[in-house]
Amino acid sequence: MGESTSDYLVHAINPYVAVILSFVVFVTALFLQFRMGRYVAWTYWFAVVMVGVFGTMAADVLHVVLGVPYVASSILFALILGAVFFTWGRTESTLSIHTINTPHREAFYWATVCATFAMGTALGDLTAYTLQLGYFGSLLLFALLFILPIAGRRMLHWNEVFTFWLAYVLTRPLGASFADGFGKPVSYGGLGWGSGWVALGLTVSIAIIVLWLALTRADVQGETEQGDEGSLNQG
């Protein structure tokens, strides 16, 4: 949804205005999330959605506006992601989302998510354009790579925190390749549905799922020992 919405906005309105507006909404979403002080479905997923939209724009600005190659931007965001993981681990001694029960830890979490989305966008474009796999070739590649955390956890008993973040990182280029494959024009190797329609369809799908989560609380795992002060300690 972030990939298709970003593509639609920068073409529907002035791209500079689109980036500024997305940044404002992105900051607003994070502000609301931190104000909650606990996991609430709509604020959490609103923040995730805006990270997806603005993270895509941040990655695209490096290439489109500044002319940074996809290889360089992918490496840059990977280094940033690695630095966030390293700092988070050294500071808090764990990267588990089940221990996110302070604003400080939540800040590390959202910094990680932002870096993940930006890197995923650049990585998806790298495989589609630079490596010339195309959108659906990239989609297949990342879908196959997604077998790694599943097999690693179930068959090789990989560390669950490592496995979680590996899967999380792979969701971004997988989703970006999906959105581009259906939304981009046929002349660019897509199906030509249009980024606006793809964004709308995915937005409605997300809204329905989040509404279901909010009503059923199916994603709430219960209280942790630390209590209810953490924004992610229940989800």
Image (cartoon, helix red, strand yellow):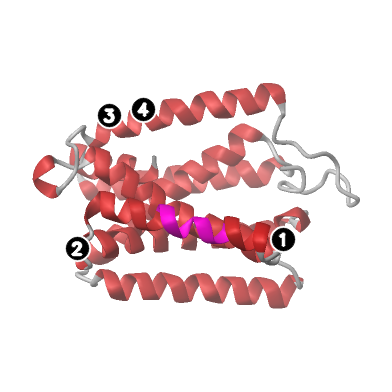
Q: Secondary structure at mark 2?
A: loop
Distance between the Cα atoms at labels 3 and 4? 6 Å
- The 10 Å Cα crowd at callout 4, few under 14, some 14 to 19, many 20 or more, is few
Magenta stretch: residue 144 in it? yes
Above or below for 52 versus 99: above
Magenta stretch: residue 100 in it? no
Mark closest to the chain's N terminus, 1 or 3: 1
In the image: residue 1, left or right of residue 31: left
Q: Based on the displayed image, in which of its 4 quarters is residue 84 positioned?
A: bottom right
Three-letter code, disc 3: Trp
Question: Most extreme residue toward the front, as rendered?
Answer: 155
Which residues are drawn in magenta? 143-149
* Closer-to-camera residue (6/18): 6
Three-letter code, disc 1: Ser
Counting from the top left corner in percent of width and height, residue 100 is at 74, 56
Residue 197 badge: 3
Mark 2 lies on residue:
132
